[in-house]
Image (cartoon, grey):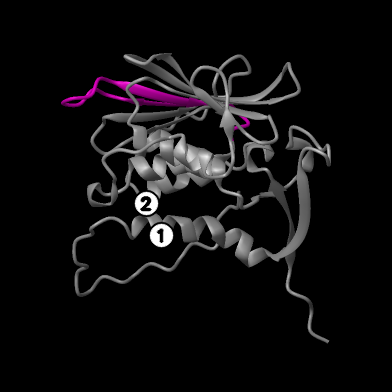
């Protein structure tokens, strides 16, 4: 009798804003391999630094229990001052990846303007405060601080109860609106977040707050998800024609899952 294919237990979590951080490689590996971002190598420091090919953007991943773990800085450009975005440790990687994917997208695929609130209004988020929205489960809040004539930074905050903050994302006042909208669109996505490994990393197991469905998935599919993502993003770039003698490298076999 043939052996059953090896499977991996995958937890599918909804809502995704309470799914935990996930695997940082979902962000860092495609930036390096598909988008050409370079990285330093300091094995004695528990951090990752990635810089864009034009040296205008720097992504820092640095575990810090008292601050944001992810920070993206961008240098000033004509018509736009320098800007930043930062994300707490438990910000789902799918949401951060939506920002970096949009930042690295070809110019022809980028929309000029967008409303970060619109994806949330479409799924029933309610008004909150002077200029904000709150999710139907009252766990996630999106607001922009400032005045009508001088809008400020964006804050996305997820909490459990009144006092337990799960994570926060911050976008400086000059952050392109399309990047904030990419984040809120990913936040509004009803698809569950897939997580492997210990479920203890979830901020809560309360079945009244999160839904967790476990599925056995072929290990080859789990391992290949990151590799597929890298190839998809790499395909966006305009590459020079391959030399007649060049061979297409075989896909790596050790891709990591989220």
Where is 212 relative to 41, above or below? below
> Can you see residue 70?
no
Measured from the top left, where is residue 31 in percent x and y? 40, 44
Q: Which residue is mark 1?
A: 232
Looking at the rendering, the stretch of residues picked out in magenta corresponds to 71-91
**In the image, 39: left or right of 210?**
left
Q: Which residue is mark 2?
A: 34
Q: Which one is closest to the eye, mark 1 or mark 2?
A: 1
Question: Dividing the picture into quarters, in which one does residue 241 lie?
Answer: bottom left
Q: Secondary structure at mark 1?
A: helix
> Is residue 72 highlighted in magenta?
yes
Name of the residue lying farthest toward the bottom: 1
Instruction: Tell whether 247 sits left or right of 60.
Output: left
**Residue at (43, 68) in percent of width and height:** 250
| Mark 1 Cα-neighbour bin, 10 Å: few <14, some 14–19, many ≥20 | few
- Residue 221 inside the magenta-drawn segment: no
């Amino acid at each position: 009798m043939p052996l059953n294919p090896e499977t991996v237990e995958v937890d599918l979590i909804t809502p995704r804003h309470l799914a935990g951080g996930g695997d940082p490689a979902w962000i860092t590996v495609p930036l390096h391999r598909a988008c050409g971002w370079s990285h330093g190598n300091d094995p004695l420091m528990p951090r990752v630094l990635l810089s864009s090919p034009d040296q205008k953007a720097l992504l820092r991943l640095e575990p810090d229990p008292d601050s944001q773990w992810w920070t993206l800085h961008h240098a000033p450009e004509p018509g736009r001052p320098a800007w930043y975005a930062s994300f707490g440790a438990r910000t789902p990687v799918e949401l951060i990846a939506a920002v970096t994917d949009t930042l690295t997208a070809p110019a022809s695929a980028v929309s000029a303007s967008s409303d970060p609130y619109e994806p949330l209004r479409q799924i029933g988020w309610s008004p909150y405060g002077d200029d904000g929205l709150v999710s139907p489960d009252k766990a996630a809040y999106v607001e922009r601080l400032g005045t009508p004539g001088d809008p400020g930074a964006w804050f996305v905050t997820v909490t459990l109860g009144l006092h337990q903050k799960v994570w926060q994302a911050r976008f400086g006042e000059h952050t392109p609106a399309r990047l904030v909208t990419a984040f809120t669109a990913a936040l509004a996505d009803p698809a569950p977040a897939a997580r492997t490994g210990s479920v203890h990393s979830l901020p809560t197991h309360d079945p009244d707050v999160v839904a967790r469905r476990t599925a056995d998935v072929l290990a080859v599919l789990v391992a290949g998800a990151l590799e597929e993502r890298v190839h998809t993003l790499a395909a966006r770039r305009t590459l020079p024609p391959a030399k007649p003698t060049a061979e297409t490298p075989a896909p790596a076999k050790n891709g990591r899952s989220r």
